[in-house]
Every structure is written in C-alpha cells, then in structure tokens.
Amino acid sequence: MKAIFYTAGRRLELRDAAPPAAKAGEAVVAVDAVGICGSDMHAWLGHDPRRVPPLILGHEIAGRLGGAGGARVAVNPLVTCGACAHCKNGRGNLCAKRELLGMRLPGGFAERVAVAEKNLLPMPPGLSPVQAALCEPLAVCVHALARAAAAGGEAAGGGRALVVGGGGIGLLSALLLRGAGAQVCIAETNPLRRAVLAKTDCGAVVESVTEQNHFSLVVDAVGNAATRASAVRAAAGGGVVVHVGLADNDGGLDTRKMTLEEIAFIGVYAYTEVDFAAALGKLAAGALGALEWVEARPLADAPQTFAEIHAGKCAAPKVVLLP
C-alpha cells in the first residue's frame, strides 16, 4: 500500500508499505479521508518526542471496513486500557496507558490502518468521508466546552466568548459556541485564513485580541506563551480559560490576575467516548453548517501541504487528505 511517512524534521515521504495485519480485536480500515492535525504539524517540525520517525502520522480518520463496499466508519483513534479507574469512570482520555493512532501506533496517512473494533463508529447515512474525518477534532471541542461549562464558563451556553486561533479546533469551537447562543470573537493572525473564517458563521473575526477583562470564556486553540498571555488578559473576572493547544510550554500566565480575579484555567486533552459519539451526531445533524471551509487534497500532496500550512500559505482551516 502507499503511505506517507514522517522520516525526519520537516520531511515526509510517500513510500510503499506492507498492509497492516489485524490482531485479535482489530479490523483493517481502508482510509477514505484523514485530516491534518496541529499535532501532526508539531511532529513534522520535530517538536514531539513521542512521535519517533519513521512513522505514519494521522489520526482524524474515516473509511471502510475491508475495502470497497465495506461498512463506512468513523475512527476513534484514542486507544485506552479499559481497566483503570479513569477508563471505568468514563474518562479514558486520562488513561495512563493511552495510545493514539499516528503517535506510536501507525496512523491514517496511508491506504489502510489497523484499528481496535471497539473504536469504530458507523458513519451516519449522508455524511461524506471528508465530513466524517472532522469527528475527531470536533470531539476535542465538544469535550473542551463541556469542561468549560462544568467550570462555570457562562459563554458555553451564551454570553461573550473568545477563540484564539482559527484552525480546525478554533473554528469548530467557535461554531459550537455560536450554536449555543454565544457572542463569539475569533482571533487569527493569518490573513488568508481570516478571509475564509469571515465567510462562515463563526462570529467576529479579528487579527489580534485587544479587549481586556471582556470575555467570560476564552478558548486557546494555539497554546503558546503569547496566546496564553492574551487569553488571560482577555478573560473577565470569574471567567474561564480553556487551554486546548499544545504549541509550547514556555509560560505566559499572569497568575496574579488569575488569582485576584478568580479566573479558572483548565487544560483539556482529547475526548471521551461519549464526546466522540456526540460529535458524530452533530456532524450528521448538520449542526456545523456546510463545512465548505474544509479542503480535500490527494495523500501524495502531504509534503507540499505541510510546508504550505507552516508557511502560512494555506487558507483552509482544515485540510483533509484522500488516500
């Protein structure tokens, strides 16, 4: 089969690879669509020690069981032990033994991938593979906003919300918040991407955050020192900052303001099985709109696409590859 291998920093190669063999409890999925995640970009830059080359990246996957004519499925790429306290309490995303397709296990930038059968969800009728590939990033957003609501983030159900970063996670979060009745502002530095965002129903689109003490909920979908600093500055007293991005770990928090104004800062990671199923249901119901901002490209275009995204030359908030 053909697969895209991450072979070194800023290097991807299209190679022939042996098709995966399913182990007990697994199935082989023919990949129809696989999204490029920010964590894939992070690995490509050589910034993720968990992803060791040579490795097939990719975890936002939709496909068919076996091959042509097989049952269509959306893939939950988060593999958990199922036996620890977190797993038994429905928080498998915190499982100490968790794995992710495309991290240490072979991922979906390939024609086929082996997946645990329990991680396969039937794709609803009428949903295209490109749309279904959004289920994984949307599940991250569903989980993040649920955690925000539990912490008192009023904008999760209305009010003022700021989203920092207009990539897939940022835009999907903004669309969910808009659907919940929030007044949303989304900040994105890339002018090409801002032009695309402006054509969606994601709220007000700006280049940078100027308001301070203004938003009851802030979603940091980038996660670097500068965005953390701007997120805390923008948060109103008693507000919630939800930290989803993992760009760096270089500080940026004004802990004095967070303490004096009781601003909750919540780190969120991945999603639960319930979140993933909810995300698939939202996609099937058309709750995110037309999704015309998603761009599909051939799998072989992955090296060029990664370079374009990094250089800021790709306008699409989400690119999905087609093996």
Image: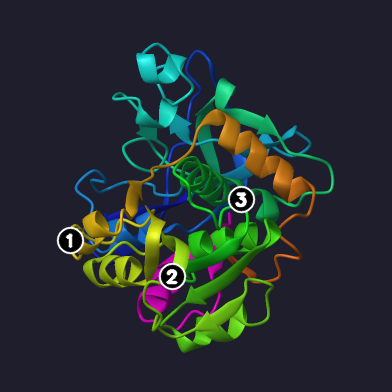
Residue 10, percent across and down? 27, 67
Q: Which of disc 2 and disc 1 is earlier in sequence? A: 2
Report how far apart the C-alphas of labels 2 and 3 lie in the structure: 20 Å
> Along the line of sight, which residue is nearer the eye, 137 or 267?
267
In front of the other: label 3 or label 1?
A: 1
Label 1 with label 2: CB-CB less than 8 Å: no
Please give left or right for residue 211 compared with residue 74 in the image. left
Query: Residue at 48% of width from left, 25% of height from top?
Result: 21
Characterize the local packing of mark 3: few (<14), some (14-19) or many (20 or more) Cα atoms within 10 angstroms.
many
Query: Residue at 59% of width from left, 37% of height from top?
Result: 276
Q: Amino acid at mark 1?
A: Arg
Q: Which mark is residue 256?
A: 1
Which quadrant would residue 229 be assigned to in this image? Answer: bottom left
Secondary structure at badge 2 equals loop
Residue that numbered label 2 is attached to: 165
Q: Amino acid at mark 3?
A: Ala
Instruction: Look at the image and say whether residue 320 sits in the magenta stretch.
Output: yes
Q: Which mark is residue 133?
A: 3
Which quadrant would residue 249 be assigned to in this image? Answer: bottom left
Q: Which stretch is magenta?
A: 299-323
Report how far apart the C-alphas of labels 1 and 2 lie in the structure: 25 Å
Query: Residue at 48% of width from left, 68% of height from top?
Result: 162
Secondary structure at badge 1 equals helix
Q: Which of disc 1 and disc 3 is earlier in sequence? A: 3
